[in-house]
Image: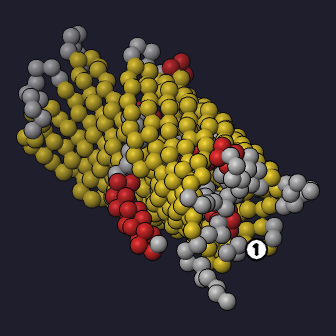
Amino acid sequence: MLHKKGIFLVVLLLSLFQLTSAQVANSPFSSFGIGDLYGNSLAQNQGMGGIGISNPSSWYVNNQNPALLINNYVTTFHGGMMIENRTIKDGTSSLQNTNGNLNYLLMAFPIKPGRWTTSIGLTPYSGVNYKLTVIEPVDGSLTSTVQTSRTGTGGINQLSWANGVKINKYAAVGVRANYLFSSINNQEEAKLPQTIYTPFLEERNYVSDISFSTGLYLHKDSLSKKNYQVNIGVIYDLQTTVGTRRTIRLDTRSAINGSIVDSTTLVNNQASSIVLPQTLGVGLSFGRPTHWMIGADVSYLDYQQFRGFTGQATDTRTGIKSAFGLEIMPNQTGVSSYLRRMTYRAGLSYDQYPYLVAGNQVNDFGVNFGVSLPVARISTIDFSVKIGSRGSIVKNTIEENYFKIYLGMTFNDNWFIKRKFD
């Protein structure tokens, strides 16, 4: 048994290398700010529209609100991956692309079961992957044009350590420390017809710093003979000035084969910073534990305080994330029907992004559903799908239709818990 657990840990550690290079599918919207924000929803949360601020679980890592960790009574490992397909339209043409990657690795284990649980995890914070091409007329010319290509790759990862502590039978608090790291690379190349050389500008921003999040969990159990439960959750991400280092290089490249003819470093490892604004989230859920649960989350993103890699203010607004979801567990402990032991989920999500495209904020609407398949005692395979659209050709000149698949694997065991023998 210990041998199998050791192999599993080695696989998890090797998977970290793939996770740190994970990317989102190509999206022009990821060119804004620090890219697409992933959030802390896991595969089973995605099946309910992404909710997870107030609805606790004993069998999954409670990753969105650290205060909910007190519900993890046994050691829980959770790994997940995401596959997404996007169709991008601009009114005259469309582009389709697909990408997939390892999405997260987490482990939670109780220090004092029911009173204090801790977790560690490696998850993506943001992702950048875009390629934009613009053809414009050259000033003073009636026939010549310049083609400018802009590309971006990378993103920010976070290594997190969270703790949830029970205050009394109705309340718990939590705190999470996040080490943010990795880099974002942006490139720009301008091509003129009938020229031998082209300028190529590359900017790489390295991120390395710590941020903090807090959580509160209030609940009331046994509301009737049916043992109903009501939950309230609150999360707060503190505004953080994150240290960065910038390197900017200007190359002269051959227009024929792209080889570098000359290179000049304009900025070399210059210290800078970005400001990640405060975020406040509130969740409310109600249900009968191990039978069914419904809930809703709303988060407020104060991105008017956001500062990019140049340290200057950007034209951003307040962002809103909202979701509603439910899950049904017909009979988790039954043995007569496998279908009744499965967990079924559905949800809706609506987000308003804080940045402006063509002078308007970008809206995102998604429909979610999912299922968890019980395997090997109290472990599961979790499958969720999200179908949605982001942006509008009318308001933002660009529209994305997407299809996302989330696959998670959850393992529960009594590691780190001392067994007593008579």
Residue in the image at 57% along x and 68% along y: 413
Question: Going by the image, does 335 lie left or right of 144?
Answer: right
Asked if residue 194 can be seen in this view, the reply is yes
Between 123 and 15, the residue placed more toward the observer is 15
Q: Hey, what amino acid is under mark 1?
A: Ile
In the image, residue 48 above or below residue 271: above
x, y percent for residue 342: 65, 47
x, y percent for residue 185: 31, 46
Residue in the image at 80% along x and 50% along y: 287
- Label 1: state its secondary structure: strand
Between 219 and 71, the residue placed more toward the observer is 71
**Residue where numbered disc 1 is placed:** 167
Residue 218, quarter of the rendered image: bottom right
Image mark count: 1
x, y percent for residue 226: 88, 54
x, y percent for residue 95: 38, 23
